[in-house]
Amino acid sequence: APAHPLWPEIERVTLEQLQYARLGVEGGVWQLFAEDGEMKMYKREEEVDGLAVDPLKAVHTVKGVTGREMTHYFFSPDVRFEWETTLEQMKVLETIADDTLVILQIHKRVWPASQRDALFWSHVRRVPNDTDRDAQDIWIACNHSTEHHEAPSNEGKMVRVSLTVCLVCQTSIEPPSDGGPVTRDHLTCKITYCSVVNPGGWVPTSALRAVYKREYPKFLKRFTQYVKDRCDKQPILF
Ligand SMILES: O=S(=O)(CCO)c1ccc(-c2ccc(C3CCCC3)c([C@@H]3C[C@@H]3c3ccccn3)c2)cc1
């Protein structure tokens, strides 16, 4: 493994997030708050120091793409402005490896909150599926807040959110019965998106929960449609 000071944390958090995502929405602790076709969004209402930090878990099934393609476009900074509508600025502060970056994002002001930024490492990896032989490998992308010497400390200016986010994708292939080639019509990608965002500074709880309710479904719907459009008519990346 690459010798970078962040690497042990990246390894630990990525694998923890994988397990957390694979727990699904069992246990009755998750409250369904949005549904759109195959997409189901759940939340838990939690407060930290009086701030709403509601963990979110979304499950979705997308036809015609692979988990590698889905996590690739989620990870890639080059295309982020094409699907992330709440982004104002983004800077890759460090390229730790071709699958691991440190990113500073400035988000648009979301009334009534003041403007925020987010500083996090971003990692994408294939997790070999050691259980089910004929299943495809799992892909995970994970974003987790970090410190970085190159990020402004924002004295008195921008509020910094802290976040842990993961996108876990499992592809399945229903091969054509006539033994023909596998095309995108035979692909199904099961997605679990998890996020915990601490706003980092006071936002009225009811207003913040309204923002969550509006922004998260819009974000996941727009992102997954973006990937479908990008992959359409392109060679399949398994
Ligand atoms: O999955 S990602 O890594 C994709 C890369 O961008 C990611 C997702 C979400 C955020 C995020 C950052 C700030 C805020 C709030 C907190 C107080 C005021 C702004 C929110 C609120 C929840 C709402 C929200 C949800 C989805 C998209 C944008 N807005 C979300 C950041 C990164």
Image: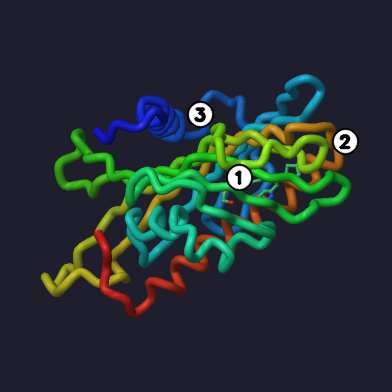
Q: Is residue 200 left or right of residue 119?
A: right
Q: Do labels 3 and 1 touch, CB within 8 Å?
A: no
Amino acid type of the residue tagged 2 in the rendering: Pro
Instruction: Find the distance from the CA under tag 3 to the CA under tag 1.
Output: 13 Å
- Residue at left 70%, top 30%? 53
Q: Are marks 2 and 3 in contact (CB under 8 Å)?
A: no
Which element type, helix, strand or loop, lies under badge 3?
loop
Task: Indicate left or right for 39 with 114 as reference.
Answer: left
- Element marked by disc 1: strand
Q: Residues within 10 Å of mark 3 (few under 14, many from 20)?
A: few
Q: Percent x, y for residue 206? A: 86, 38
Q: Nearer the viewer, residue 193 or 11?
A: 11
- Residue plotted at (45% across, 35% down): 21
Q: Amino acid at mark 1?
A: Met
- The one of 67 and 155 positioned closer to us in this rendering: 155
Q: Nearer the viewer, mark 3 or mark 1?
A: 1
Find disc 2 in the rendering and name its residue. 204
Mark 1 — residue? 41
Whole-percent x, y for residue 43 in the image: 65, 36
In-front residue for pair 142/191 = 142
Q: Can residue 168 be spotted in the picture?
A: no
Mark positioned earlier in the residue sequence (2 or 1): 1
Asked if residue 53 is positioned above or below residue 108 in the image, the reply reads above
Q: Is tag 3's residue or tag 1's residue first in the polypeptide sequence?
A: 3
Q: Residue at x 59, y 56 (%)?
A: 90
